[in-house]
Amino acid sequence: MTIATILTPRMIVIGGGAIAQVADVLGQVGGTRPLVVTDKFMVSSGKLAAATDVLTKAGVAFDVFSDTIEDPTTEIIEAGVARMKAGGYDSLVAFGGGSPIDTAKAMSVLAANGGKMRQYKVPNPIPKQGLPLVAIPTTAGTGSEVTRFTVITDTETDEKMLIAGVPCMAAAAIVDYELTLTKPYRLTADTGIDSLTHAIEAYVSKRASPHADSLARAAMAAIYRNIRTVCAEPQNRAAREAMMLASTQAGMAFSNSSVALVHGMSRPIGAFFHVPHGLSNAMLLPAITAFSAGAALNRYADCARFMGVAGDDVSDQTAVAMLLDALRQLNADLKVPTPKAYGIDEAKYMSLMPTMAEQALASGSPNNNPRVPTKDEIVALYQTVWA
Ligand SMILES: NC(=O)c1ccc[n+]([C@@H]2O[C@H](COP(=O)([O-])OP(=O)(O)OC[C@H]3O[C@@H](n4cnc5c(N)ncnc54)[C@H](O)[C@@H]3O)[C@@H](O)[C@H]2O)c1
Ligand SMILES: [Fe+2]
C-alpha cells in the first residue's frame, strides 16, 4: 500500500476579489506586524496597493521589502533576512509571481535556521519552522503559494537549488485571479505552460498518489482548454479564473507528488542562461515526454485524454502520439523558441551540458521520472532540444 503525506496551507481563499480578505487572513494565522515581500514592478505599477491598501485600512502596521528579483538569489535572501531582523516582524506577506513567494519562503527558513541557504537544499532537512507566510500569487503560475518548495539560485555557484519541507509551506494562500489580468502575452504563456508541466509531471511521477492525481487531472483539463484563449484574450475573466485555479491545483498536485525530469533539466537552463522558468520547461516538455512515455504509456495516455486531445476509443500508443503532437503544436502556437532561437550562446550551452546534467541529477527530480535517465542521456536531451 502506498501512503501519501499531504501538505497544504492552513487556509486557502480562492476567488475574484479575495485579496480584500488579506488583513483577516493574516490575523487568522497570527500575523499582526508583517514584512511584505514583493518586487519593484509590483510597487511601481501600483499592483501592490491591492494588498497594502487593505492592510492600511485595517490598521495593520507593515513594511515593504521590494528588492526581490526574478529567479531569486541567495544574495537577495540574505538582504531580506537582514531586513527581517532589523524590523521585529511576526509574519510575512508575499505578493507577486513565484519569485517573491519563493523569496519570502527562503527568508522565513534562513531567518529561523541561520547559516547559508545551501545547507537546506534537498535532501537536507530544515530543522526549524519560521514566521507564518501569507502567499498571494499574481501569476498562474508556479503554484508556489501551496507548495513545500522554494527555488533559490546560489550566487556563488549559479546553481538553482531546490529547497523543500514543511517550513517552506505558506501558512495561508490568497488565490485571486483578478491579480493576473495584467499579465502580458509572454508571461501568460510561459507561466501557463509551467502549470501544465506541473500537472503532467505530478501525474506521471513515480511518487504519484490518488490524491495528487485528482488535482493534476483537473488542472490539465482546465489548462489545456484555456491556455490559448487566455493568451489571445488577456481580459477574458473566465479563462483567467480557470487558469488561476488550475495553477493552484497543479501546485498542490506536484507538491504532494513531485515534479520530474522536465523541471530537473529546466532549472540549470534558467540558472545559467536566465530563461524564464516556464519557457525553459516549454522548450523541454515535448522532447522529454517523447523520451519518457514508453516507461509509463498508460499514464501519458491518461494525460492526453484529460487534456481532451485523445478519446477513449484510441489505444494508449495512439493517445501518446496525439499527446506529443499536441504539445509540439502548443509550443508552436505559443511561439516557444528553441534555446538556439532564444539567443543562447551555442559554445557556452554545449560546454555547460555536462554540468547542467550533473545539477539536474543532483536535484533529485529526474529520479521521479517514469524513465530515469543517465547523465549521458540528459546531455543527449539537452542536445536534442537545442535547435
Ligand atoms: N516554489 C515552487 O514550488 C516553484 C514552482 C515553480 C517555479 N518556481 C519559481 O518561480 C519563479 C518564477 O515565477 P513566475 O513565473 O511566477 O515569475 P516571476 O515571479 O519571476 O515574475 C516574472 C515577471 O512578471 C512580473 N509579473 C508578475 N505578475 C504580474 C502581473 N500580474 N502582471 C504583470 N506582470 C507581472 C514580475 O514583476 C516579473 O517581472 C522561478 O524562480 C521558478 O524557479 C517555484
Ligand atoms: Fe515549475
Image (cartoon, rainbow, N blue to C red):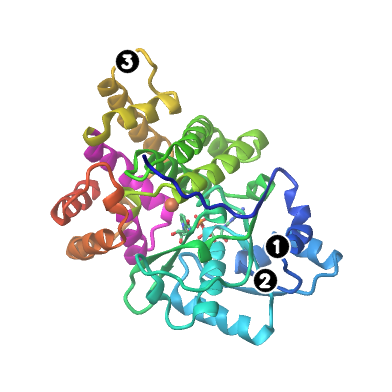
| Mark 3 neighbour density, 10 Å: few (under 14) some (14–19) many (20 or more) | few
| Predominant SS of the magenta segment | helix
> Who comes first in sequence, dot 3 or dot 1?
1
How much space separates mark 1 and mark 2, taking CA atoms? Answer: 9 Å
What type is the residue that disc 2 sits on? Ser
Residue range highlighted in magenta:
264-293
The residue nearer to you, when weighing 84 against 350, is 84
Image coordinates for residue 308, horizontal then vertical, percent: 44, 23
Q: Is mark 3 on a helix, strand or loop?
A: loop
What type is the residue that disc 3 sits on? Val
Q: Is mark 2 on a helix, strand or loop?
A: strand
Residue in the image at 38% along x and 39% along y: 331
How much space separates mark 3 and mark 2, taking CA atoms? Answer: 52 Å
Residue in the image at 24% along x and 39% along y: 292
Up-down relation of residue 68 to residue 277 (above or below): below
Q: Mark 1 points at which residue?
A: 29
Q: Name the residue under label 2.
A: 91
In the rendered structure, the answer to whether residue 62 lies left or right of residue 232 reads right
In the rendered structure, the answer to whether residue 25 lies left or right of residue 102 reads right
Up-down relation of residue 242 to residue 369 (above or below): above
What type is the residue that disc 1 sits on? Val
The residue nearer to you, when weighing 29 against 245, is 29
The residue nearer to you, when weighing 310 against 133, is 133
Image coordinates for residue 201, horizontal then vertical, percent: 37, 43
